[in-house]
Image (spheres, helix red, strand yellow):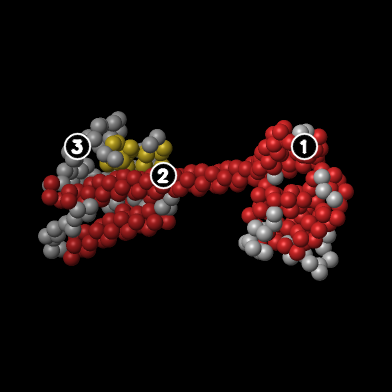
Amino acid sequence: MKEQEIRPGQWTGPRYTPPEKELRLPLPFPEINEIDPRKLEKALLERIKELNCMYGMAILAERYSDSIEDFLRNLVNILPPSWQYPETTCARILFRGVTYKSREFRASQWRQSSRILVYNEPAGEVEVFYKEERPAQDEGPFLKEERLLLDAVAEQIGKIAVRISSEQELKDLNRQLTVEREALHEANMALRAVMARIEEEKRNINRSIQANVEKIIMPVLHALAMELPPSQKKYVDILTASLEEITSPFINRLSRSYLSLTPTEVRICKMIRGGMRTKEIAQILGIAMATVNRHREHIRRKLGLVNKEINLATFLQSSMWDQDVSGAGGAGS
């Protein structure tokens, strides 16, 4: 282990450096060759204090698993009781610019420290002080076991800091993903609402165009066709058919769903749906009103309206026709 930089007031005597083989375990069980029962008991009590320190550290790591600040704030107070002279021991932890001190902290020249590494980079250090002079031991007034304990504490702080940092990053990432998912869901809902409004506007425009063509342009074309000579009438028929194909899905649906309807009956259905009376239809088509009435009877029969008190114009204009067409599938063929 590298020597720490000596600060003013820091212990300047020889520092205990454990053999390389002892560094493989956080707290290796020391060899006790003492046969004096009192000294043996004292050594065992010191080992118990060290174990209690590591156990308490594990409990704090679990209790404050989401806050390195709370963990270190509580950890610094369980270090002094683990040293040989707890009544005069105090501790300080410096971690990423923040200082945590034990109760009744007072720095002194009898100091022991160990560096904290996070991702193999220095992030702070753990310090233990004796506020009063004590007999010389392995490292100034400190035991070699206390050096091992301090190094183990610093190492565990680094590992716990890495774990808490990783878990916090994962939580932040999950939180960000949740926010983005909710924003995407709201955007999709808004987009669906916009698309629905667009579709509704398109339907309104189509209905408006269809109504204008059926009620304004088509009657004029039918009247014009009656005044033109046969050689020119075909152009009006072509224009009429083109307008019907573009603007009147009613005719296409009616022709597909009721295959038995003749082209004349389909045209009369369209005129009836547009609100034209029998006389107007007869004038436009150039046929007698009685012929129009016969066509109306045939249409009612083919649409399944015989003996039903349903007005033909109302049926063709209402949603009843849409429902009936969806299940007709070629009725009357």
Report the residue at 24% width, 35% height from top.
4
Label 2 Cα crowd, 10 Å radius (few <14 / some 14-19 / many 20+): few
Farthest residue to the right: give it. Answer: 279
Circle 2 SS class: helix
* Image marks 3 and 1: residues in contact by CB distance under 8 Å: no
Q: Furthest residue to the front? A: 230
State left or right for residue 17 relative to residue 258.
left
Residue type (three-letter) at the residue carrying disc 1: Ala
| Figure disc tally | 3
Q: Is residue 169 visible?
A: yes
Q: Nearer the viewer, mark 1 or mark 2?
A: 1
Closer to the camera in the image, 180 or 130: 180
Circle 1 residue: 225
The answer for how far apart the CA atoms under marks 3 and 2 are is: 32 Å
The answer to which of 178 and 255 lies nearer the viewer is 255
Q: Quick one: quadrant of the C terminus?
A: bottom right
The residue that label 2 is drawn on is 169
**Residue 295 falls in which quadrant of the image?**
bottom right
Front-lying residue, 30 or 191: 191
User: Where does the image place residue 314, in percent across and percent down from the top left?
Assistant: 81, 56
Neighbours of disc 1 within 10 Å: few (<14), some (14-19), many (20+): many
Residue in view at x 66 percent, y 49 percent: 252
Judging by the rendered image, the residue that carries numbered circle 3 is 2
Question: Residue 228 at what x, y percent from top left?
Answer: 78, 33
